[in-house]
Amino acid sequence: MFRRVDEAGAVLRLEFEGEAVLAREGDSVAAALLAAGARAFRDTAISASPRGPYCMMGVCFECLVEIDGIANRQACMVPAADGMKIRRQRGAREAA
């Protein structure tokens, strides 16, 4: 469903749920994960329903993930960086 229209930019290596993901310089974390085939980025707090990016502009908060141990990060708003470790956000998280 999602594919890149431009392959320019340096290749970055991320990790999502322990699996290697290739990204391009300039990708957001959400764009990189979607291009790699990921669909569910988090589970809801009450029913554990899977959720993924919806608006891709920081409005809906459906793309919340844990990045390098920090929860509640909007994947669509964070630029991908080489070596990032990303995990699905499962349920509610405490406010820091």
Image: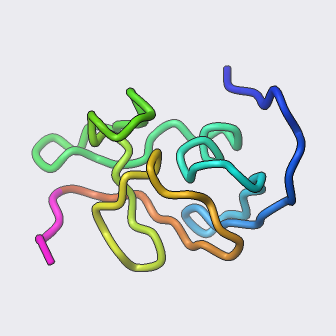
Q: Write the start and end of the magenta stretch as one range.
A: 92-96
Q: Which image quarter is the C terminus in? A: bottom left
In-front residue for pair 32/48:
32
Q: Give the x, y percent position of residue 16.
A: 58, 61
Picture quadrant of residue 84: bottom right
Q: Give the x, y percent position of residue 37.
A: 66, 38
Rendered residue at 46%/45% (across/down): 76
Prevailing SS of the magenta stretch: loop
Picture quadrant of residue 70: bottom left
* Left or right of 3 in this view: 75: left
Q: Give the x, y percent position of residue 31.
A: 60, 41
Instruction: Please tell me whether residue 64 belongs to the stretch shown in magenta.
Output: no
Rendered residue at 74%/53% (across/down): 23
Relative height, residue 80 to residue 63 (above, below): below
Picture quadrant of residue 11: bottom right
In-front residue for pair 51/62:
62
Q: Which image quarter is the N terminus in? A: top right
* Left or right of 95 in this view: 20: right
* Left or right of 17 in this view: 63: left
Q: Give the x, y percent position of residue 26.
A: 69, 51
